[in-house]
Amino acid sequence: MHVVVVYDTAQKRNPKILRTCRRYLHHVQRSVFEGQLSPSQLRRFQSDVGKLLDHGHDHVIIYTLPPGAEIQRHTIGVNKPAPSDIL
């Protein structure tokens, strides 16, 4: 499934959240990641991120699109290249 992750965390936790997101997804904009994950990868990602958060302060949003959904991406401003597959 296609996954988009947006996060807003305390500055001291940002580096750990960033590294965790990069292990699973493509970095497309400051606190935004996207990519393809299997259901088990998504569960693992959620668990890994959940362990790093202050649940009373930090906020992470995970959008999931079902397999086969047509994804349209529209950008305004400086355009970064579309993400490529993670090796």
Image (cartoon, rainbow, N blue to C red):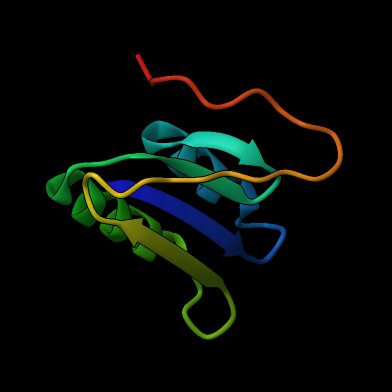
Q: Residue at x 26, y 41 (%)?
A: 37
- Outermost residue, top side: 87
User: For the point 42% across and 63% down, which residue is it?
Assistant: 62
- Identify the image quadrant of the C terminus: top left
* Residue at the right extreme of this rendering: 77
In the displayed structure, does residue 78 sit left or right of residue 67? right
Could you say where residue 33 lies in the image, as x and y percent from the top left? 53, 44
Q: Give the percent coordinates (x, y) of residue 35.
A: 40, 38
Position of residue 48 in the picture relative to residue 16 (left or right): left
User: 50 left or right of 30?
Assistant: left
Between 30 and 63, which is closer to the camera in this rendering?
63
On the image, which quarter does residue 80 sit in? top right
Of 57 and 63, nearer the camera is 63
- In the shown orientation, is residue 83 left or right of residue 31? left
The picture places residue 75, in percent across and down from the top left corner, at 72, 43
Instruction: Please tell me whether residue 27 is drawn above or below residue 7 in the rendered image.
Output: above
Percent across and percent down for residue 66 are 24, 55
For the point 66% across and 45% down, the residue is 74
Q: Which residue corresponds to the image point at 52% horizontal and 86% vertical from the top-left?
A: 56
Q: Closer to the camera, 35 or 65?
A: 65
Farthest residue to the left: give it. 40
Picture layout, residue 61 above or below residue 71: below
